[in-house]
């Protein structure tokens, strides 16, 4: 089964378009977590246990583990292995390099860590991305339009007919011969998201920017999902995993995830 | 001292513009290395010992360490710590993310690993880069025009007046208020390099693409260096570190580095 087929299958089976983002910053977790032997692992496993009923995907942000060195990498390894097989496991790594180097990154994230998908930066072009596309069961989400203010610096650069982020969307459509390409399209720029969806009706979107970054729920859901009510997953990191700084952090994370799932489902069925 | 001042000072003191790239692929090292306890560390330390007299900088390609998991990250940590203080230590990581995530990457590479500089992908714009620029002693080399074929997919995207890689160069010039920004400009596109140098006469270049990738030596040196014969470092990875697959691998690596240094110095003084 191709990655994009599996993504939709998982979302349909779990009746959820929610992706939980594990951006595990030890400065933000409840104080008592710090005393645990492997605090990032302990925290993440508790979050996973509490949210897995309501989530279709998990996105591990590599920066938050690299910040803790080899121990952080080891923690990330344990967390991705802890995730069950019926969710989509995404490495939010934003990698991309010349061919022989991208091949090593693909080995790191797909073969060794067994992630299902990875986020990729398109700046280096097709041959930087092709090493990630060889296995149709593994997916890439290529940065198209990001959530941040700086998205306007280069992604909006236009030749009058189209902007860079639109060119990226069109190119990724061309690269999707194995049905394993998607796009990262931020919820904080709904007009751009609407336009990208019109350009590439069938590519799945990974949508950050709801939750802590303040993107508009209604517009994002309306514009991101495809004609079947699938084709998009919505990521929530801080707003789920730091929903309480007490001993009930995992309970509230589960409740938050359930509520977000239901809110999205209500809107996509209406 | 700002990063860019220190870079030129080191190059002048060592009379070298050579950067040795540590892309340590255990499939390519001499067979006997594999049996060592920490083969990536053993190999890299031997290469460093043999080349340090002739090199101004070392560039560690993170992909080649991430491919070996937490042990690879640990090896990278040991290697960067082994490098002496009188060389420039560059993490070739090509990172870049929204602000709070870039901050974690900066912590990982600058604070924890004590690299002097990092390579950054510009796609996410200014606020993805600013967390790396706060400390004037730490430098960033932002991808401008890369060496690969895919560089033409997006970097050449033009509005008629300028292409994306030129816009990146101009923007980076604006961001260089702490004198710690440089550009990655590949030697395989000499015309573009010449043009970038004319746009930003004072930004240092990190130049890949000589050696295994076949860029033109004469043109790269002519176009990359500034009016003082400095302002650029030329990276060589495979052509130095895999110059022999026998027990003499470090000896030949040292000889190669010396020869490359001398070749560059001859051309920059002529």
Image (spheres, coloured by chain):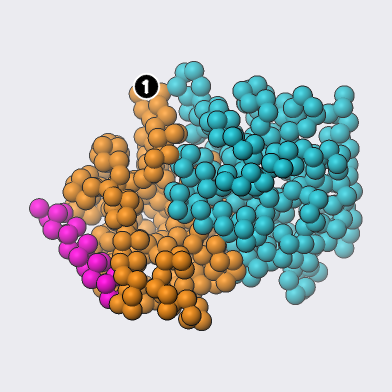
Chain colours: A orange, B cyan
The residue labelled by disc 1 is: A160
Of B61 and B3, the residue lying toward us: B3
The answer, for residue A98, to whether it is visible in the render is: no
Answer left or right for B44 relative to B65.
right
In the image as oriented, which residue stretches furthest toward the top?
B161
Could you say which quadrant of the image residue A185 lies in? top left
Tell me if residue A3 can be seen: yes
Report the front residue among A72 and B139: B139
**Number of dots carrying numbers:** 1
**Quarter location, residue A240:** bottom left
Q: Which quarter of the rendered picture does the N terminus of chain A lie within? A: bottom left
Could you tell me residue A10's position as x and y percent? 28, 65
Q: Residue at x 61, y 23 (%)?
A: B199
- Asked if residue B67 lies in the magenta stretch, the reply is no
What chain does mark 1 sit on? A
Which of the two residues, B266 or B215, is positioned nearer the viewer here? Answer: B266
Q: Look at the image and say whether residue A265 sits in the magenta stretch.
A: yes
Q: What x and y, as percent, mark residue A161?
A: 35, 23
Vertical arrangement, residue A102 with respect to residue A261, above or below: above
* Vertical arrangement, residue A222 with respect to residue A211, above or below: above
Report the residue at 26% width, 37% height from top. A191
Task: List x then y, in percent, for residue A37.
Answer: 51, 81
Report the residue at 57% width, 57% height from top.
Answer: B107
Q: Which residue appears at 49% of the width and 34% of the height?
A: B154
Q: In the image as oriented, which residue stretches furthest toward the left? A: A270
Q: Which secondary structure lies at badge 1? A: loop
Q: Is residue A57 left or right of residue A131?
A: left
The rendered magenta stretch, by its main secondary structure, is classed as helix
Residue segment shown in magenta = A250-270
Question: x and y percent of residue A124 in the render?
Answer: 53, 40
Residue neighbourhood size for the residue with mark 1, other residues' Cα within 10 Å, grouped as few (<14), some (14–19), many (≥20): few
């Amino acid at each position: 089964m191709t990655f994009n087929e599996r993504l939709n299958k998982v979302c349909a089976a779990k009746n959820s378009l929610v992706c939980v983002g594990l951006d595990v910053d030890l400065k933000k977790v409840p104080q008592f977590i710090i005393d645990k032997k492997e605090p990032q692992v302990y925290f993440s496993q508790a979050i996973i246990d509490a949210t897995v009923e309501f989530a279709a995907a998990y996105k591990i942000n590599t920066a938050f583990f690299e910040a803790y060195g080899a121990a952080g990498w080891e923690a990330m390894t344990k967390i991705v292995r802890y995730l069950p097989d019926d969710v989509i496991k995404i490495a939010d790594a934003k990698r991309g390099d010349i061919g022989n180097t991208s091949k090593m990154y693909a080995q790191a994230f797909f073969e060794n860590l067994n992630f299902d998908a990875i986020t990729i930066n398109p700046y280096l072009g097709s041959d930087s991305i092709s090493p990630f596309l060889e296995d149709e069961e593994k997916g890439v989400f290529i940065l198209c339009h990001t959530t941040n203010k700086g998205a306007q610096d280069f992604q909006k650069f236009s030749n009058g007919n189209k902007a860079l982020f639109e060119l990226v969307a069109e190119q990724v459509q061309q690269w999707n011969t194995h049905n394993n390409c998607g796009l990262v399209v931020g919820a904080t720029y709904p007009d751009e998201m609407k336009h990208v969806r019109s350009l590439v009706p069938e590519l799945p979107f990974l949508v950050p920017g709801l939750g802590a970054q303040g993107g508009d729920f209604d517009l994002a859901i309306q514009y991101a999902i495809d004609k079947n009510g699938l084709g998009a997953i919505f990521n929530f990191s801080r707003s789920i995993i730091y929903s309480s700084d007490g001993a009930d952090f995992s309970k509230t994370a589960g409740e938050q995830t359930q509520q977000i799932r239901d809110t999205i489902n209500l809107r996509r069925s209406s």
